[in-house]
Amino acid sequence: MPDSMGRLMKLYKIFVHNRPFVQEKIDQYCSGVFTLQKSTALGRRGKIATQHGVIETPFFFPVGTAGAMRGITFHDLMDLGAQVLLCNTYHLHLHPGEDAIAAAGGLHSFIGWNLPILTDSGGYQVFSLRGMRSISDAGVQFRSHMDGSTQFLGPKEATEIQWKLGADIIMCFDECPPSTASRKEIEAAVDRTLRWAKVCKVTHERLKMERNQTSSSSPLLFGIIQGGLFADLRKKCAEELIAIGFDGFALGGLAVGESEDEMLDVLRAITPLLPVDQPRYLMGVGVLRQLTACVALGIDMFDCVLPMRIARHGTLLLSDGSELRITNAQWKNSHEPIDPDSPSAFSHTHLRSYLHHLFRVNERMAETIACKQNLGVTLKMMRDLRTAMDALNR
Amino acid sequence: MPDSMGRLMKLYKIFVHNRPFVQEKIDQYCSGVFTLQKSTALGRRGKIATQHGVIETPFFFPVGTAGAMRGITFHDLMDLGAQVLLCNTYHLHLHPGEDAIAAAGGLHSFIGWNLPILTDSGGYQVFSLRGMRSISDAGVQFRSHMDGSTQFLGPKEATEIQWKLGADIIMCFDECPPSTASRKEIEAAVDRTLRWAKVCKVTHERLKMERNQTSSSSPLLFGIIQGGLFADLRKKCAEELIAIGFDGFALGGLAVGESEDEMLDVLRAITPLLPVDQPRYLMGVGVLRQLTACVALGIDMFDCVLPMRIARHGTLLLSDGSELRITNAQWKNSHEPIDPDSPSAFSHTHLRSYLHHLFRVNERMAETIACKQNLGVTLKMMRDLRTAMDALNR
């Protein structure tokens, strides 16, 4: 604890101006897990070392909920430059179960993806099952959306399951209050999130010892900062999580209905408190404009289903930054490539009229082409940000 | 006419023993369109020359109904060794319409497939719209399944539409009676199919002249032999279509509920009547065992949605010839590759347990992996047949 507090105090001094990206004198930090190569006006440029390779930061996670991407093969995903995949503990626990996956040699072997994987804890999913769950201090009892069976997930269980899955980065089990919750509810959620974070940490350390693993051979455990839009609750949560000690810190409970300014205000208040030598993960943000803004505020990692979801409904993100509703009648006779500069090769050869047609006749290939376009543009934007940072201050 | 009849008489002599595949003295026929390289005990080995390249026969058509394969990209389709694609005039006429496709430069440009394409005539689809269509000698009035609008398709229209689409092989508009139809109904359908075949031929020749096209620069037009299980009606239909003169001959109205023996009996009776120097296309057959038997009876071309349809419901065709119900509980913990010898690379790396899981949780990727497996095995079987024929009689 004294060590952590000492580090925290040092960081307070470093970030006294709340500007994590102008640390000109501090060029390189390395915590063993995370190397911060440089802080620039665009954001932080770094690397996360995992058991399945290095991830260049800042980056965006493609979301492969149950171990697959809707309509995009892993081969196509790597073509788009994906470095890492996010999978959901909730879904994989319900089917096929962590024991089946462990028997297959872990999640990487099971799904056939050899780059890093992050699993979330299932907290967000079980708290979304309103009317189908009851919360206690030990965790959440809920009904499976698959077969109605009674299930239980708490901090201990979520950590053990994620170890069995064998992900490279695992997340603490947190309480995710709705965006409409009162201060009192959010305060209670922060307290429970902190109690659970300790259980996750203890479980994680116990599993390391039981398996004779060092920090470099075990998964990275990230804490999740809750606290809604209340800066003092967020700050309390961040400080106590830093005191417990994690490999990285996530901001949860954002991008759930608040305004963009409110969200950015939370980042402005909290990122300066976070250890400069550890990665920072903003959960649930995937709007291109917001990604750039949040990177500039010191965030290193993002995940969101948005680029895929809007693709499925016919909204394309083009490589010039504009958007296009491909289902609109105006594209029926528009026989030019979807996006000649796209990171997705499909969009060089396939015509807007063709993609419009596939959406209109409900062909599944529509989703594949659109998802590959949107995910490709999102991943490329993060790559371009990294390249731009690399070119700065040289 | 005298020419056609003369050719027919010659063919009768050649096939006097009803064994088209033991023509040892006649090694190579060439009609300009089709080259029969050899007839073997396994079947006929040949080539069809089209405007978008040569197709090696015998072969199987992947069915890309509205201009796309369910879950399989064209890139993956070519990886599997597909030489050619089948698209449906009915679907493309309803959306986006042949004019939009012509404006895109034709079907190949519109969908982004540069190998040969066959379009069917739409006959099969409109005759399946029972209760939504009325038949006259000019064609079929029907209601669109998309928007309920009144539409009309006849032999003249179907031929003109297929020309606009720009397919390499186009089909006559035929009447497809149900498999339960009486002899009287089938006889009437044969007569109408023959009258319509003449209209298709006349329309085809008119379009050739209007566009100043030679036979080698225009699509190939195939006649369709109807007649149910009545050998005399099939024979009459075949003879009259041969007299009209087409680039190839299809057998329609089979694989619609009759027994396998009944179907093979029709082939035994009819293939010997068909010109040896023209391709023969059996519509709607895609069971592996039947493909081999029908090739041995002298068929060169097949199409069927069956390999894809059973894939979507979880039945896999393995490369050793066996079948596997991947949705069965026994595969939940079966952590071996789906089919290590598969023509589909997905099946080398992905596990049976993983594919079982994807089906159980309704992930779309299940369909992609299963369809690629089944189509791959079907296409490879045809390729293996061709290779085996090439090795014979050398």
Image (cartoon, coloured by chain):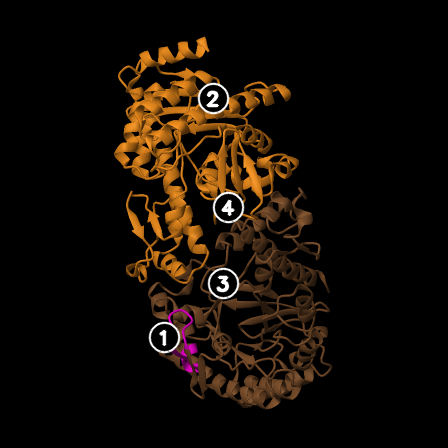
Chain colours: A orange, B brown
> Does the stretch in magenta take in B151?
yes
Query: What whole-number distance in Å separates the C-alpha atoms at marks 1 and 2?
Result: 62 Å
- Of residue A360 and residue B61, the one placed in the foreground of this image is A360
- Of residue A315 and residue A266, the one placed in the foreground of this image is A266
Query: What whole-number distance in Å separates the C-alpha atoms at marks 4 and 2?
Result: 30 Å
- Of residue B137 and residue A179, the one placed in the foreground of this image is A179
Question: Which range is magenta?
Answer: B143-158
Badge number at residue B289? none
Amino acid carrying label 4: it is Thr
SS for dot 3: loop
Question: Disc 3 marks which residue?
Answer: B64
Question: Disc 4 marks which residue?
Answer: A73
Instruction: Name the N-terminal-most of marks 4 and 2.
Output: 4
SS for dot 2: loop
Question: Disc 2 marks which residue?
Answer: A247
Residue at the spot 64% in from the left edge and 21% down from the top edge = A210
- Mark 1 crowdedness (10 Å alpha carbons): few <14, some 14-19, many ≥20: few
Query: What whole-number distance in Å separates the C-alpha atoms at marks 3 and 1?
Result: 24 Å
Give the chain of mark 3. Answer: B
